[in-house]
Image (spheres, rainbow, N blue to C red):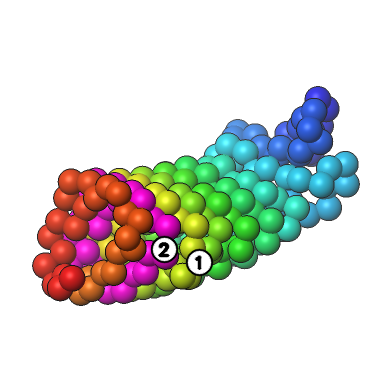
């Protein structure tokens, strides 16, 4: 394992599998709130894979973010804890090699209006886009097998969620789309097995669902208070 210092702002660690982990120093990175745009993960010469670790840019004043193709996983890098920053991040480009969007990765970024997920993505973590209330639609790639608990909770302007017919999605977690009050359209693919507790609770504009025959478990209150649901 090799450790490097990035100008006193970041720690770079290259592990035994030749994966670079980038983690910002909390006592330094959060001072740079005048930086409004950044690119992460490009030109890491000593490895072919990059992981953005920890909550390095929590509450940073970033309006535009590019995550380069070298990055394969995102931790809590861009989570918002301080509500002075909730409307800042507007644009994000995610590299085509991202397989995992971790827990709370973009939580509370209520200014984020759209995001394109890469075709190799396999999991969307717990609360990954929780309270991203300006998102209007989301296309879930066929490769995704898990949408975690609270993944899109309180995305109140989310109108449609699309999964292709060849979707590998198996599990929709607890409260994954709870309080998506404007959600009126969602597809499930052909392999879904589990819908968690309150997954679509209070999706009051959802009018129709078509569940595949593969569904084994619909947990309690999964569609509770979906008052316009017809079938």
The residue beneath circle 2 is 190
Name the quadrant of the N terminus: top right
Q: Which corner quadrant of the image does residue 75 belong to?
A: top right
Q: CA distance from mark 2 to mark 1?
A: 7 Å
Residue, far right: 45
Instruction: Return the x and y of residue 49 as percentages of the image width and height.
Output: 76, 45
Residue at image coords 34%, 63%: 212
Crowd band around label 2 with a 10 angstrom C-alpha radius: few (<14), some (14–19), many (20+): some
Residue, far front: 213
Observer-nearest residue: 85 or 39?
Answer: 39
Residue, far top: 1
Helix, strand or loop: magenta stretch: loop
Badges 2 and 1: C-beta atoms under 8 Å apart?
A: yes
* Above-or-below relation of 105 to 161: above
Res. 25 in view: yes
Instruction: Return the x and y of residue 136 as percentages of the image width and height.
Output: 39, 72
Residue at image coords 68%, 61%: 96
The answer to if 188 sits in the magenta stretch is yes
Q: Which corner quadrant of the image does residue 157 belong to?
A: bottom left
Observer-nearest residue: 117 or 156?
Answer: 117
Instruction: Determine the secondary structure under disc 2.
Output: loop
The residue beneath circle 1 is 166
Q: Earlier in the sequence, mark 2 or mark 1?
A: 1
Q: Tell me which segment is drawn in magenta.
A: 181-205
Observer-nearest residue: 71 or 170?
Answer: 170
Crowd band around label 1 with a 10 angstrom C-alpha radius: few (<14), some (14–19), many (20+): few
Residue at image coords 64%, 54%: 98
């Amino acid at each position: 394992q090799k450790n490097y210092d990035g100008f006193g702002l970041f720690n770079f660690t290259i592990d035994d599998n030749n994966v670079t982990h980038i983690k910002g120093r909390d006592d330094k990175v959060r001072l740079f709130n005048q930086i409004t745009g950044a690119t992460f993960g490009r030109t890491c010469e000593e490895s072919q894979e990059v992981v953005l670790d920890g909550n390095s840019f929590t509450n940073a004043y970033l309006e535009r973010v590019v995550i380069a193709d070298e990055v394969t996983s995102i931790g809590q890098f861009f989570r918002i804890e301080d509500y002075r920053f909730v409307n800042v991040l507007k644009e994000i480009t995610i590299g085509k090699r991202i397989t995992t969007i971790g827990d709370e990765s973009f939580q509370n970024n209520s200014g984020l209006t759209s995001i394109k997920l890469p075709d190799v993505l396999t999991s969307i973590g717990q609360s990954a886009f929780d309270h991203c209330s300006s998102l209007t639609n989301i296309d879930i790639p066929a490769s995704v097998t898990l949408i975690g608990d609270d993944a899109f909770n309180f995305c109140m302007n989310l109108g449609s969620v699309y999964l292709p017919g060849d979707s590998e999605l198996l599990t929709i977690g607890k409260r994954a789309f709870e309080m998506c009050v404007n959600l009126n359209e969602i597809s499930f693919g052909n392999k879904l097995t589990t819908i968690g507790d309150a997954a679509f609770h209070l999706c009051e504009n959802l009018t129709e669902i078509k569940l595949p025959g593969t569904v084994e478990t619909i947990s309690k209150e999964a569609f509770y208070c979906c008052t316009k649901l017809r079938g």
